[in-house]
Image (tube, rainbow, N blue to C red):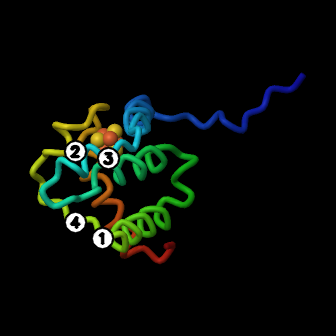
Amino acid sequence: MAISTDNAIPVPKIDADNAFDAATCIGCGACVAACKNASAMLFVSAKVSQFSLLPQGKVEANKRVLHMVEQMDKEGFGNCTNTGACEVECPKGISLENIARMNSDFLKASVSSEA
Ligand code: SF4
């Protein structure tokens, strides 16, 4: 019997660990409730990161981050002012690093011709 190699793309351990950590977000909304700006950046950045860190998620990474940020803005969530209240309240320990990563990904996607 042949062994499938479809999911045999090597993933650096640090990326796998960070993607797994981001994927533990349960969407509880505690981060939004704790934020004085009602920002959803921690939640959305966790969802963006859990895919963008992995090779399989890089295929549509530009489109994904642009669309998710656009939708977040449409829904009326506030802007992040880096108070860190979201990270403190998050029951899953989702890191602010995800917000920094999403901002970087968003900037790259905004100037990319692939989006
Ligand atoms: S508080 Fe943490 S687990 Fe809950 S939605 Fe926000 S990022 Fe996800």
Mark number, residue 29: 3
Q: Assess mark 3: CB under 8 A from ligand 1?
A: yes
Residue 16 is left or right of residue 38, and the answer is right
Residue lying at 35% horizontally and 60% vertically, measured from the top left: 105
The residue under label 2 is 96
Q: Are marks 3 and 1 in contact (CB under 8 Å)?
A: no
Residue lying at 16% horizontally and 61% vertically, measured from the top left: 37
The crowd level at tag 2 (other Cα within 10 Å; few <14, some 14-19, many 20+) is some
Residue lying at 26% horizontally and 43% vertically, measured from the top left: 30
State the residue in front, 101 or 112.
Answer: 101
User: The disc labelled 4 sits on which kind of residue?
Assistant: Gly
Q: Could you tell me which quadrant the N terminus lies in?
A: top right
Figure quadrant of residue 104: bottom left
Badge 3 element: loop
Alpha carbon distance from label 3 to label 4: 14 Å
Badge 2 element: loop
User: The disc labelled 1 sits on which kind of residue?
Assistant: Gly
Q: Nearer the viewer, mark 2 or mark 1?
A: 1
Q: Disc 3 or 2, which lies upstream in sequence?
A: 3
Figure quadrant of residue 87: top left
State the residue in front, 82 or 61.
Answer: 82
Badge 1 element: loop
Figure quadrant of residue 96: top left
User: The disc labelled 3 sits on which kind of residue?
Assistant: Gly
Alpha carbon distance from label 4 to label 1: 6 Å
In the picture shown, does residue 57 fall above or below 15?
Answer: below
The residue under label 1 is 76
Q: Disc 3 or 1, which lies upstream in sequence?
A: 3
Mark number, residue 78: 4
Badge 4 element: loop
Residue 51 is left or right of residue 33, and the answer is right
